[in-house]
Image (spheres, grey):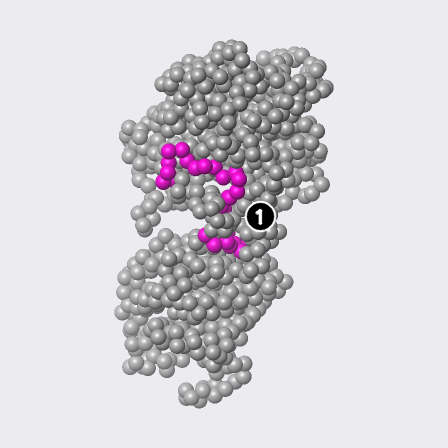
Amino acid sequence: MTPFRRYLEWLAGCDGEVARGVWGRVLAGVEPTLLVAGGVGGSSVFPEQVEFGLSVEGTGALVEFVRGRGLTVNSVVQGVWGLVLGVLVGRSDVVFGSTVSGRPAELAGVESMVGLFINTLPVRVGLRAGERVGEFLGRLQGEQVELLDHQHVGLAEIQQVAGVGQLFDTTIVVESYPHSEELYETSYHGVKVAGIDAQDAVHYPLGLAVNLGERLIGTVGYRGDLFTRETAQAVADRCRRMFEAVLTDPDLRVGQVDLLTPQERQMLLRDWNDTTVTGRPDRCLHELVEEQVSRTPDAVAVALGDLQVTYAELNARANRLARVLRAAGVGPESCVGVLLERSVDAVVAMLAVLKAGGANLPLHAQFPASRMKLMLADTEAVLVLADEVMAERAEQLGLPVMRVDEAVNESDGTDLGIAVDPRRLAYVMYTSGSTGRPKGVGLTHAGMVGRVLDRSWLVEGGVSTLMHMATSFPPSITEMFLPLLTGGTVVPHPGAELTARHIRQAVERHGVTTMMIPIGLLRVLAETDPACLSGLREIVTGGDVVPPAVIRTLLDACPKATFRSHGGATEASSYAVHHPMDATRPVPDSVPLGRPMDNTQVFVLDDFLRPVLPGVVGELYLAGSGVARGYVDRAGLTAERFVACPFEVGERMYRTGDLVRWGADGVLEFVGRVDDQVKVRGFRVEPGEVEHALAGCPEVEAAVVVAHGEERRLVAYLVGQVELEAVRAWARGMLPEYMVPSVFMRVDSLPLTVNGKVDRRALPEPDLTGVTGDYVAPRTATEERLCELFADVLGVERVGIHDSFFELGGHSLLAMRLVSRAQTKFEAEVSMSDLFGKPTVAEFAGLLSRPRKQRPPLRRRTDPKGAQ
């Protein structure tokens, strides 16, 4: 029997099912390792190459190393490339291709077969930070030995088993023939063999070929249209340094391997983080307000309609309330629930809490009572401050309620003079929690002062902000204190509805210069009335990916304004990085996160807390003066997310969970998340918290929540015999409005991965056709046009006249878009409150015939004291 026939019989006898099962286990949960997405373009479309090598002495040391440890050169090459690849992609689990001979060693005469039998197989390398390099290489070799009997399986079949289209785009090959460009005669039957030119052998974007002769020679082959020669040379240099590191100290821990040059470390850790600003006041927020009062006592601090409150008046009212709070037991580290509408009283209340030495716990009227009770219990709040409108709601929370409008009657309006350490709590802001329980972030005076006094704010000539965000939303702190610490004016916007008309009115009547606008709302304004922002000097946005088309539209309408995208986290006092855009510089095709703000350090790190190279995706860590104290009453979670900074002794840094990368110019770009967290209308939402709430509903056996589409609509998949509307009502009673899913779907079961986890990618497409039930067609031309408008705004196929806007997934931002378009389309005087009260087409259509109201002319503020 010929060797080839024996080979065919051997191949036919292999158990394909067993082999596929082995590969399935080896590649379970694998994520493809692809470099091309982060590659930089070159000028050539042809394969090119660069070389590196070890000295004769180094090569001899390698030979002794592999002999002494029972390793093969192939295993060392695989380990070296795995370590280098981990650095190049910033991950601890990488995959690359490796060529195998395809000739089973146990078959007699197999080496005499003529033909190319090689196979390219995936090598999955798991890097463990605490494992010694020598131990790592031994483990890797052992894992590859276990796969020897399954090397006949084709790559396409393996990738199908793994459930991915492409596992890798880098390969290695270990050559066993002399490295020479000249023909030579071998001792094997006189066959002449030529050395393979790696330039002709590159079939993947990047490949490593290693030849071990008198000297180890490595060749990095690359596609010139995807990588520059400089990039390939840098990869080759890292390979050489990795070989040298392995041979020098095999007891080195994997997590300690450092392939950065001193120049790269200086650039990543120091140059791009050169944000130190000295001389900042070591004061609390309220103390800086008091200093501003002494400078401009008669300037307008708060303006609401015809009411104007000077700095002296604001300070006196806050002092009187602070004395009442002190008498009620409020002191250092005491939390006070604040449940008020945006108003002068709200500014007075939050300032008074700080003056009394306490910390503000902002509550929101739309929060379910159960959530507010949890927040108050977590923080051991002393009492709840409320106004006349919110008093009845506050009474349901189980704590003493103090009415701000009644409590400011204390006669003494002088400063209390209570010494408060700037490291004390100023605010506790709650965010969504992945375990099903929201978590409170402890923000200090020092952290917030640093953010408010950052040099990036445009405050020259005075700043006036429109305070329109919910006070439970972290950026609202800056809305309030940016003007108060710089002699400007806070303009509270009462009520939940904010339209383009309201913005124009605030700019014209009160001289508003600055607005913080989440990108969801900014997108609506750009679509409906971009010119409404034309009177503003500075518009700050963020909370999600910023579409460049939105900024371009707004800059066309507002050429004198500066737009700034902001990134950061509540745990870092909201703002940490920023990127300005105005009419003098083009808006990039992808709006970046930007550069760090004052006294802020930004680190992009891999799984081992090592800095990653520009262009490499890593996790964003934030350090510096803005880092919060931690989570209230959550020591374990605090230790997990607020970790010791390896680059500054005694400092901490916050692990954001954001995946980012440095641009070549030192500007941060957002890539994604390491977890399932999403942003919904600027709010952080952990799907796990929503799932936990839904799972508590009777009859719900299991629940999975995902964000769908550009609008980030939350979709809930439910297992169990449930009434969807009953689950929706349950969710509204447990969660804030922005966390209630837009779509609820019943499924028989949840798809699982091979590891038994929910396969979110395999969930069915959400049903966006509209609510179930009887469809009632429009009866009039107005209803027909309105049905089309409802469907377009909601992104559903059709809407009947009795379908509710909010049951179809509508929310406040979509409501604003619909109302604005209805005002234009029908020339009607309608508002968001009208839609909330009459949410069906049939009901809303009746409002479109109302005549427009005549509004009184607006008065413009003409001097800093608010004279009209």
Q: Give the left or right position of residue 531, taking residue 656 as reference.
A: right
Quarter of the image with the C terminus is top right
**What range is drawn magenta here?**
609-637
**Vertical placement of 867 versus 555: above or below?**
above
Q: Residue at x 38, y 18 (%)?
A: 399
Q: Is residue 222 left or right of residue 128?
A: right
Q: Which residue is mark 1?
A: 273
Say left or right for 279 vs 812: right
Q: Which of the 4 image quadrants contains residue 854? A: top right
Out of 104 and 567, give the one closest to the viewer: 567
Residue placed most toward the observer, 290 or 778: 290
- Report if residue 826 is visible in the image: no
Secondary structure beneath dot 1 equals helix
x and y percentages locating residue 385 in the rendered image: 45, 18
Task: Identify which amino acid the numbered label 1 is placed on.
Answer: Asn
Q: Please state the horizontal and vertical placement of residue 50, each as a whole percent of the image.
A: 56, 70
Q: Position of residue 589 (x, y in %)?
A: 61, 45
Compared to 679, does 158 lie above or below? below
Q: Residue at x 28, y 30 (%)?
A: 699
